[in-house]
Image (tube, rainbow, N blue to C red):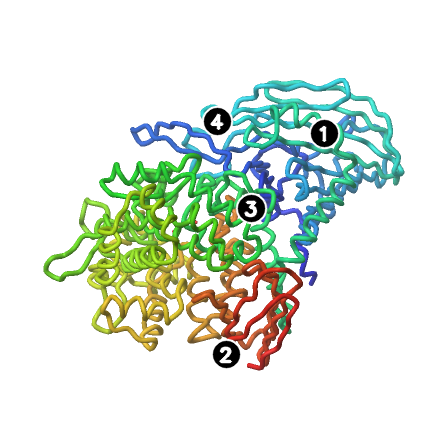
């Protein structure tokens, strides 16, 4: 088992969607699915290319109404590279006898390899090796190298290399009734130097993308002259070249690409840049070498090792998750106006939108590339004006960030969605998840904890925290009879519950997670007023618009927020949750398995999960995932609730029984919260979470885009949960809780400008500070604080 290779064997068109998603290559600026280059979009092939935050809005007429959606745009297909014999058809694996097919994604080097051997109808056997790279070193560059070997024939072939602008957004079957055309081709052609070029522009957002490509042919490592002919069709530009092939002599064909967009910096116009950079690009070898070097520096910092005796593929899958995080956002993304999408730039599901999933992804980024984390947080900061506008329109103060965010921070959640089970379009009320307004300040705070970047906090972060505090204080309403603050008419993380049974009005009251998080935001805002210097605070008060009275009200609400509990001390998901009916879990689990999209199934049965104690995903348990038991107890005690560590297992068991894991974000949170009490259970849930995308556990959703939140949390599990790592009270804590099934874990983190290597086994923990110049930091292990500074290492027995 090679822990660096995602390996597939055999040509299985029905698996192609999944392989394409998982074999996507990207560099934090654009990504291209691992589709076959030799055929355009067809029933098994979807060669999507997406640009980070490259969105376009389009109107559709559906179910008797006009709706507008903002989509992540599928850009022209640059992969297009195919061949035919002079007397034959263009190559398609579906039209030949496939003798051998191997597809391998090399995670260490960022190279996609496809090895094929096939026989055509005239008994000609050909071997073809395809290597592909999307450069991590230069985010405007990509390439493909073909090595074609005629096994039993000689003769002429025509190779066609194209940039195909006839693409649409057709990647998600459920969206097929919606408008799918987002681009128009605005320029195309071939230069005298045999460079083909094509530029496309989005129809509404006016983003312009230019692609240019060159093709070279080599025999025995020497470039050869070939006959070339440009081919121009509507929205399509290609070059056909004729190559003489000789039996058992390989021919190498290299296609290189440059891609620039109007969102790039330091450019004149995209086409000028793309053309001029292509000219000085160098060979494919050079492109691949430099990209491999960039990957090697990423891995040096960000690899995470699980040492175990099993011959499992856990390590490979974990690396695949790290790989996809880095392909979605990387060093290249720094400075761009980019957020972290829930599904990567790997497909069109959820339209490339930015959700609260950031909450699951930031911890890894904070602790490996803090400059990137800072840049991504600015995506939110820049959208404060829109969030303020939304808050005002809804009658609140401060800022109200949208549940789904895209180009300008407007609410991009769909208003109706298709239930593929019933074929019905139904209202979508998930935008009522205002809890995202706690996730964003939480991310700011966590970034600050791992970096102590006071400049960021005072220039940007604090403004986000104060604005969201103002929002929460205006959303919370005092209940005079209980003298408690309550939040009504919203939806919590568990999207199965959006209204009360029988009610027409969407929204629920007092979602415990939301109320708890609102309390946390208000507490942090108060704490911040004590940390920031007087002049900065004064400036922020003016800019955000709050005064002493507001600070007093934040204190008051954070002492009196209401949290629903049942009689046994279990936190109730929302008011009235316990009165809901019990679901016949055996019936549904035996029919549909452990992971169920109950909302779709019940809607088809003219029923609704709103009627049952049945959760899509971790909701109350999110509290136990985000905070240590000490922090939870402190907050709840401060609110006047008696809550002890002993209550935690009961809470976990209660929700474990009634959760369908209809979201990939769920299982890994359950695994996380079990780390404290039942490590064996934690490990078995962890393994399930690790395989969610790899095995396409949700039956078809991975092909529409990876689940980045779930992937990142499996990485974070090793880094923070099994190591028991926490950052609080200005100290880095380790309290390891390794499951018996593994021997050790090791990883590097960037903490407060130090690079620290950590290795934890069942017996000891070793901490190794690399050279550097950052200020000393304190680490708490085994009940003792130790001060660490650069170049210092120490081992502790545990
Ligand atoms: C989950 C949300 C998540 C979204 C995007 C939904 O299925 O319920 O919590 O934010 O997917 O990943």
Look at discs 2 and 4 and give the one toward the viewer. Answer: 2
- Which mark is first along the chain, 1 or 3? 1
Q: Which residue is mark 1?
A: 278
Query: Does 172 appear above or below 707?
Result: above
- Which mark is first along the chain, 1 or 2? 1
Quadrant occupied by the C terminus:
bottom right
Crowding near the residue tagged with mark 3, few <14, some 14–19, many ≥20 C-alpha atoms within 10 Å: many
Q: Which mark is residue 784?
A: 2
Real-space Cα separation, disc 4 to disc 3, in angstroms: 26 Å
Real-space Cα separation, disc 3 to disc 1, in angstroms: 24 Å
Q: Which residue is mark 4?
A: 181
27 sits left or right of 71 in the view = right
Quadrant occupied by the N terminus:
bottom right
Q: Toward which corner of the image does residue 83 lie, by quadrant? A: top right
Q: Which residue is mark 3?
A: 329
Write the residue at 55% across / 26% down: 208
Q: Position of residue 57 (x, y in %)?
A: 42, 29
Q: Helix or strand or loop: what does disc 4 sit on?
A: loop
603 sits left or right of 369 in the view = left
326 sits left or right of 376 in the view = right
Q: Residue furthest left?
A: 481
Q: Residue furthest front?
A: 535
Q: Helix or strand or loop: what does disc 2 sit on?
A: strand
Real-space Cα separation, disc 2 to disc 3, in angstroms: 37 Å
Write the residue at 58% across / 34% down: 42
- Which mark is first along the chain, 3 or 2? 3
Q: Are marks 1 and 4 in contact (CB under 8 Å)?
A: no
Q: Position of residue 351 (x, y in %)?
A: 45, 39
Look at discs 4 and 3 and give the one toward the viewer. Answer: 3
């Amino acid at each position: 088992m090679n822990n660096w290779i995602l390996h597939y064997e055999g040509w299985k068109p029905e698996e192609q969607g999944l392989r394409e998603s998982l074999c996507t290559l990207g560099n934090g600026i654009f990504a291209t699915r691992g589709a076959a280059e030799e055929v355009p979009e067809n029933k098994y092939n979807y060669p999507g290319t997406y640009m980070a935050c490259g969105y376009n809005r389009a109107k559709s007429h559906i179910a008797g109404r006009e709706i507008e959606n903002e989509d992540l745009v599928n850009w022209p297909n640059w992969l297009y590279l195919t061949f035919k014999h002079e007397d034959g058809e263009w190559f398609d694996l579906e039209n030949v006898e496939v003798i051998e097919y191997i597809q391998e994604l090399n995670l260490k080097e960022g190279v996609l390899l496809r090895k094929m051997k096939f026989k055509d109808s005239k008994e000609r056997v050909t071997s073809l090796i395809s290597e592909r790279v999307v450069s991590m070193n230069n985010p405007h560059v990509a390439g493909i190298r073909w090595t074609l070997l005629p096994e039993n024939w000689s003769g002429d072939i025509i190779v066609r290399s194209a940039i195909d602008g006839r693409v649409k957004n057709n990647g998600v079957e459920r969206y097929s009734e919606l408008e799918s055309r987002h681009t128009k081709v605005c320029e195309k052609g071939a230069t005298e130097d045999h460079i083909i070029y094509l530029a496309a522009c989005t129809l509404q957002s006016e983003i312009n993308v230019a692609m240019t490509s060159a093709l070279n042919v080599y025999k025995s490592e020497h470039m050869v002259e070939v006959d070339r002919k440009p081919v121009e069709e509507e929205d399509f530009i290609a070059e056909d070249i004729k190559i003489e092939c000789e039996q058992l002599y390989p021919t190498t064909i290299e296609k290189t690409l440059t891609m620039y967009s109007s969102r790039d910096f330091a450019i004149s116009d995209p086409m000028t840049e793309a053309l001029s950079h292509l000219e000085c690009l160098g060979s494919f070898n050079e492109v691949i070498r430099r990209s491999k070097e960039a990957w090697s520096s990423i891995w040096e910092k960000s690899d995470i090792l699980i040492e175990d005796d099993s011959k499992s593929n856990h390590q490979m899958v974990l690396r695949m998750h790290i790989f996809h995080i880095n392909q979605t956002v990387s060093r290249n993304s720094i400075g761009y106006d980019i957020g972290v999408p829930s599904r990567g730039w790997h497909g069109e599901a959820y339209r490339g939108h930015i959700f609260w999933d950031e909450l699951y992804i930031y911890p890894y980024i904070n602790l490996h590339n803090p400059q990137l984390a800072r840049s991504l947080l600015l995506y939110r900061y820049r959208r404060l004006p829109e969030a303020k506008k939304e808050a005002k329109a809804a009658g609140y103060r401060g800022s109200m960030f949208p549940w789904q965010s895209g180009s300008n921070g407007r609410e991009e959640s769909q208003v109706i969605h298709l239930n593929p089970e019933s074929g019905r379009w139904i209202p979508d009320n998930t935008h009522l998840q205002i809890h995202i307004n706690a996730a964003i300040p939480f991310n700011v705070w966590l970034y600050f904890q791992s970096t102590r970047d006071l400049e960021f906090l005072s220039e940007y972060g604090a403004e986000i925290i104060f604005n969201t505090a103002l929002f929460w204080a205006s959303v919370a309403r005092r209940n005079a009879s209980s003298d408690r603050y309550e939040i009504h008419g919203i939806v919590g993380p568990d999207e199965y519950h959006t209204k009360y049974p029988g009610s027409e009005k969407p929204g629920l009251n007092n979602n415990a997670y939301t109320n708890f998080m609102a309390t946390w935001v208000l507490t942090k805002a108060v704490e911040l007023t004590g940390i920031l210097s007087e002049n900065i605070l004064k400036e922020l008060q003016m800019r955000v618009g709050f005064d002493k009275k507001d600070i007093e009200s934040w204190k008051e609400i954070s002492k009196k927020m209401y949290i629903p509990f049942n009689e046994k001390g279990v936190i109730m998901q929302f008011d009235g949750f316990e009165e809901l009916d019990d679901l016949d879990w055996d019936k549904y689990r035996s029919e549909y398995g452990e992971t169920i999209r109950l909302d779709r199934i019940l809607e088809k049965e003219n029923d609704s999960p709103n009627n049952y104690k049945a959760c899509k995903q971790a909701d109350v348990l999110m509290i136990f995932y985000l905070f240590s038991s000490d922090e939870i107890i402190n907050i709840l005690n401060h609110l006047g609730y008696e809550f002890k560590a002993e209550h935690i297992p009961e809470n976990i068991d209660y929700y474990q029984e009634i959760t369908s894991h209809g979201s990939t974000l769920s299982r890994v949170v359950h695994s996380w919260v079990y780390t404290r009490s039942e490590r064996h259970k934690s490990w078995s849930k962890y393994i399930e979470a690790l395989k969610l995308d790899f095995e396409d556990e949700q039956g078809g959703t991975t092909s529409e885009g990876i689940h980045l939140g779930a992937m990142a949390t499996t990485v974070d599990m090793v880094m923070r949960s099994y190591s028991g790592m926490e950052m609080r009270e200005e100290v880095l804590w380790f309290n390891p809780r390794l499951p018996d099934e593994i021997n050790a874990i090791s990883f590097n983190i960037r903490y407060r400008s130090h690079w620290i290597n950590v290795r934890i086994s069942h017996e000891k923990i070793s901490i190794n500070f690399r050279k550097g110049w950052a200020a000393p930091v304190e680490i708490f292990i085994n009940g003792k604080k130790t001060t660490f500074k650069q170049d210092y290492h120490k081992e502790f027995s545990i």
